Amino acid sequence: MSVTVSVVVPLYNEEEVIHESYRRLKEVMDGTGEGYELIFVNDGSRDQTWAMACALAEADPRLRLIGFSRNFGHQTAITAGMDEAAGDAVVVIDADLQDPPEVIPRMIEKWREGYQVVYGLRTKRKGESFFKKATAKLFYRTLNALTDVTLPVDAGDFRLIDRAVCDTLKKLPERNRYVRGLVSWVGFQQTAVEYVRAERFAGVTKYPLRKMLRLAGDALTSFSYKPLKLSILIGSLVSIASFVYAIVIICQRLFTDILISGWATLACLTLFFNGIILIMMGIIGQYVGRIYDETKGRPLYIVAQRVNFEDP
């Protein structure tokens, strides 16, 4: 079977949406007239997601399944799907249907025009709290300010990439992955397709605040050294301020009758500067921890089961 477009869908506890997600994806891809495959990557789901996906795959050879041995994370699941994709173009989309599959034909059209990366640009985000929208907006703009790579603002992982881009990404071995950042880093001809992000079809978000903060940390440490430079700047400013304050104290002692007191102030300043030091050590520790992850050389993920793939 000739495959023109591979659609990669990471799954984690998606039993409430998997049937509808499959139905809409199949309907859209059948309508394109392109040869295609759907690759569902089960990221260690603890509900009936895998069993339901296997039942769907039994009736549809175009639906191919990858099952991880445990939960390795959303970005890793995307990477595994890209590694197995056989298409000339690869589309990444989540199963929750917030990113409408109906946008995919527009992406394919842009790809046919010669663009090698076509990312979805959210013009509106339905069903999301003010806090989620505000923090997302702040995150993207802060990341662009801190990195040398320009990342599209208000764009997630929903995108189409050309085979050349996919093959290039497969050569990038880093473990703490931020896929949308890597896609921007590799370059190639890129453009956007605007759409309105819908409410989640069912279930709950798989990216709570804790995981969002971790993803933000991966993004910053993968694409920017500025936090380390900030540590140097803050340390230098604190040292200068301390030196100036020491001169002031010496001058007061030698040339005035002012009684030097203020132990409470001294204690507060000591705690403040110790806090600064610990924060800076924490930032450095994040980079060192990622270096440690890279040097261990463990596989990025472990595949326990494969369905509807040809034997290697």
Image: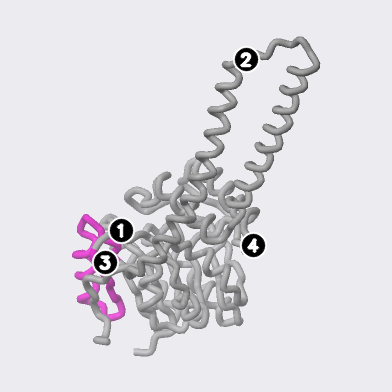
* CA distance for labels 4 and 2: 45 Å
Per the image, the residue denoted by label 3 is 68
Rendering quarter of residue 297 = bottom left
Question: Can residue 6 be seen by looking at this rendering?
Answer: yes
Amino acid under disc 3: Phe
Mark with earlier residue (4, 1): 1
- Disc 1 to disc 3, C-alpha distance: 11 Å
Q: Which mark is residue 262?
A: 2
Q: Residue at x 48, y 71 (%)?
A: 104
Q: Which residues are magenta?
A: 42-69
Q: Tag 3's secondary structure?
A: strand
Q: Residues within 10 Å of mark 3 (few under 14, many from 20)?
A: many
* Residue type at numbered disc 2: Gly
Amino acid type for the residue under numbered disc 4: Asp
Q: Which numbered disc flags the more N-terminal residue, 3 or 2?
A: 3
Which badge, 2 or 1, comes first in the chain's sequence?
1
Which tag, 3 or 4, sits closer to the chain's start? Answer: 3
Foreground tag (3 vs 4)? 4
Q: Which residue is mark 4?
A: 148
Q: Which residue is mark 1?
A: 12
User: Where does the image place residue 252, in percent across and percent down from the top left?
Assistant: 76, 18
In the image, farthest residue toward the bottom = 1
